[in-house]
Image (spheres, coloured by chain):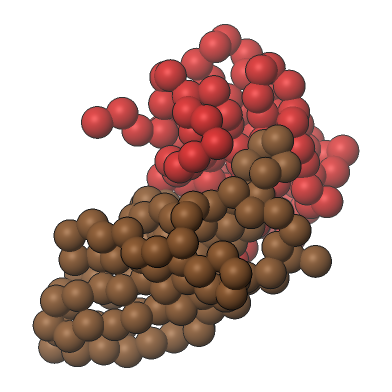
Chain colours: A brown, B red
Amino acid sequence: GQNIDQPTEMTATEGAIVQINCTYQTSGFNGLFWYQQHAGEAPTFLSYNVLDGLEEKGRFSSFLSRSKGYSYLLLKELQMKDSASYLCAVSRPSGTYKYIFGTGTRLKVLA
Amino acid sequence: EPEVTQTPSHQVTQMGQEVILRCVPISNHLYFYWYRQILGQKVEFLVSFYNNEISEKSEIFDDQFSVERPDGSNFTLKIRSTKLEDSAMYFCASSEAAETQYFGPGTRLLVL
C-alpha cells in the first residue's frame, strides 16, 4: 500500500529553525515534493528531491534518503508568515506521475 | 509568471444537481490533474489527463465524475449528481512533464 507519514502539528518561535519530517512507503518512486499550504489556499511548490541528499533554496532546504524512505524540510530564520501547513507528496512512476500526499504538518510560528 | 486559474472560486449547489468546475492550466503544460481536499483532511488525487484522455483515475472518480478538455485551454471537472460528501475544495494542477505540479487556487464546493 501507499503510506506517507508526517507529524500533525509543530510549534516554533520566530527566528528559530524547524525540521519537518516525512516518511513514506510507496510502490515506486519518482520524486518527493514539499508544498506549503495556507488555510483555504492552494498548495504552493517549495522543493523537489529525486536523488539522495540536500537541496537548498534560500531559507528552505529539503533532504532525501531513498533507502530509508525519509525526507525532511528545514525552515531557517522562521517568520510569522511561515505559519502554514507543509505537505509532503510522493510522485510515483505510474505513467501519470500523480502525487500521493501526506496529511500535512500544521506549523505555528510564535512571536 | 504563468499560473493555473480556476473558476468559480466558490460554488454552492443542491444535492443531485450537476456542477462543472473550470480550470485553465499553464499553457505549455501537457499533464493535467484534479485533486480534492475535504475540510481538515489530506489532498487526494482524483484523475490525471494527458494527450486528450484520462491516464489514471482514483477510486473516488466514479461514474458521477467526468473530465474534458473542450478547447485546448480549458480543463473541466463535471460532477453529474452531487452528493453531500462531494463538498470539498477541488484543485486543478498542471505540469510540463513528470515533474513539479502547479496548483490552481481551488474551487470550494458546498453541497446542501
Q: Is residue A38 visible?
A: no
Rendered location of residue B30, percent (x, y): 54, 23
Residue B112, by quadrant, is bottom right
Q: Please state which of residues B105 and A77 is positioned toward the viewer in this rendering.
A: A77
Instruction: Name the residue at 25% across, 65% down.
Output: A60
Residue A83, by quadrant, is bottom left
Q: Please state which of residues B85 and A35 is positioned toward the viewer in this rendering.
A: A35
Rendered location of residue A50, percent (x, y): 49, 52
Rendered location of residue A26, percent (x, y): 70, 63
Which residue reaches farthest top? B71
Which residue reaches farthest right? B63
Instruction: Name the residue at 56% across, 65% down.
Output: A66
Instruction: Name the residue at 47% across, 55% down.
Output: A51
Rendered location of residue A93, percent (x, y): 67, 44
Question: In the rendered picture of this protein, how many numbered marks are placed on residues?
Answer: 0
Query: Quadrant of the image for the N terminus of chain B?
Result: top left
Q: Is residue B70 visible?
A: yes
Above/below status of B109 relative to B50 = below
Residue A68, by quadrant, is bottom right
Above/below status of A1 relative to A50 = below
Above/below status of B76 relative to A37 = above
Instruction: Name the residue at 53% across, 46% down.
Output: B91
Answer left or right for A64 relative to B19: left
